[in-house]
């Protein structure tokens, strides 16, 4: 006996429902198999930032990290924190934690600071080429969702990026020394927003479009690669400048050396031990 048209419709709906549930199950399984190591910058006796800075960077980074942990855990990710309280964790230990997990990604959370109070904006760092898709996605969402300037993606050999064997990024969530951005950072709603945008970047990292594609516009399926500034030779440039200056008088040498040090990353946080090691 031939089936009625309604029977075909019901059968079709059942197949669609099954396909959707299977897709959802696969998505959940994929997320659950992904480990995200979240690194809240600074901690303990290391407040972060520059001397005399009013807002403690370590407090802001931990709060965003904990919010990010909650968001990712709810989506099925396995989350590991390098610190989950106000304690100091040495850089080699942070890297060792990250490298102990296979098929993981590493997200380091920081806030910027500068002597110039007008310095502002969001920037994201990476080192290895394998980390560029993650950096592109995270920066795309964080910079796009923040009411502050986009300072771009930068390649730099910070310790926690250089020593990790998994895709790793360091996101600077704004300048705590900037009156406006500092005020934003002190509100729970803004820190939640930052966590949500970072989470969106993590979830969307596999959708970053190939650099060979003609379009630079994101669609529902793709996120464009972000152009980046290569700053891996920044330190070498400072040393070269110092060597050239050494041919001059000792007084001139001292003056030029100070000028060179200020010109390199003048608007980045002064706590380079935390980032470069």
Image (cartoon, rainbow, N blue to C red):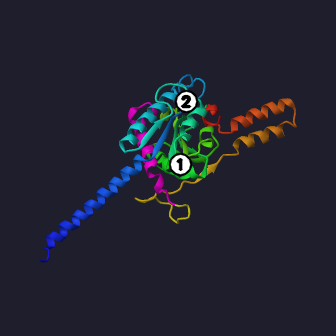
x and y percent of residue 45 in the render? 56, 22
Q: Residue at x 86, y 30 (%)?
A: 250
x and y percent of residue 208 in the render? 49, 56
Residue closer to the observer: 246 or 87 = 87
State the residue lying farthest toward the bottom: 1
Tell me if residue 197 is in the magenta stretch: yes
Separation (CA) of disc 2 from disc 1: 21 Å
Tell me how many marks there are.
2
Q: Is residue 164 above or below residue 271?
A: below
Name the dominant secondary structure of the magenta segment: helix
Residue closer to the observer: 89 or 125 = 89
Q: Which residue carries the number 2 mark? A: 42
Q: Which residue carries the number 1 mark? A: 135
Q: Residue at x 55, y 29 (%)?
A: 42
x and y percent of residue 174 in the render? 51, 38
Q: Residue at x 84, y 29 (%)?
A: 251
Residue 113 visible in rendering: no
Question: What's the magenta region?
Answer: 185-209
Helix, strand or loop at label 2? It is: loop
Q: Is residue 131 above or below residue 1?
A: above
Helix, strand or loop at label 1? It is: helix
Q: Quadrant of the N terminus?
A: bottom left
| 235 lies left or right of 177 | right
Residue 157 visible in rendering: yes
Mark number for residue 120? none
Tell me if residue 36 is in the magenta stretch: no
Number of other residues with Cα within 10 Å of mark 1, as a class: few under 14, some 14 to 19, many 20 or more: many
The quarter of the displayed image where residue 267 is located? top right
| 194 lies left or right of 88 | left
């Amino acid at each position: 006996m031939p089936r009625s048209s309604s029977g075909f419709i019901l059968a079709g709906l059942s197949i669609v429902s099954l396909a959707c549930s299977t897709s959802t199950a696969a998505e959940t399984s994929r997320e659950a198999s992904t480990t995200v190591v979240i690194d809240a910058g600074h901690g303990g006796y290391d407040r972060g930032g520059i001397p005399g800075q009013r807002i403690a960077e370590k407090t802001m980074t931990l709060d965003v990290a904990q919010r990010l942990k909650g968001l990712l855990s709810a989506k099925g990710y396995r989350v590991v924190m390098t610190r989950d309280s106000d304690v100091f964790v040495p850089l080699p230990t942070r890297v060792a934690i990250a490298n102990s997990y296979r098929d993981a990604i590493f997200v380091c959370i920081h806030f910027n600071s500068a002597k110039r109070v007008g310095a502002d904006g969001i920037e994201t760092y990476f080192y290895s080429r394998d980390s560029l898709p993650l950096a592109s996605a995270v920066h795309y969402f964080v910079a796009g969702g923040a009411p502050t300037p986009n300072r771009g993606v930068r390649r730099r050999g910070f310790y926690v990026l250089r020593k990790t064997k998994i895709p790793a990024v360091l996101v600077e969530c704004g300048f705590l020394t900037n009156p406006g951005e500092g005020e934003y950072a002190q509100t729970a709603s803004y820190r939640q927003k930052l966590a949500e945008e970072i989470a969106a970047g993590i979830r969307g990292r596999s959708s970053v479009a190939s650099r060979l594609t003609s379009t630079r516009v994101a669609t529902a399926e793709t996120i464009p690669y972000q152009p980046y500034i290569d700053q891996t030779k920044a330190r070498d440039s400072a040393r070269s400048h110092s060597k050239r200056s050494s041919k001059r008088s000792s007084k001139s040498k001292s003056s030029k050396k100070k000028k060179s040090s200020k010109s390199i990353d003048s608007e980045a946080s002064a706590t380079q031990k935390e980032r470069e090691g």
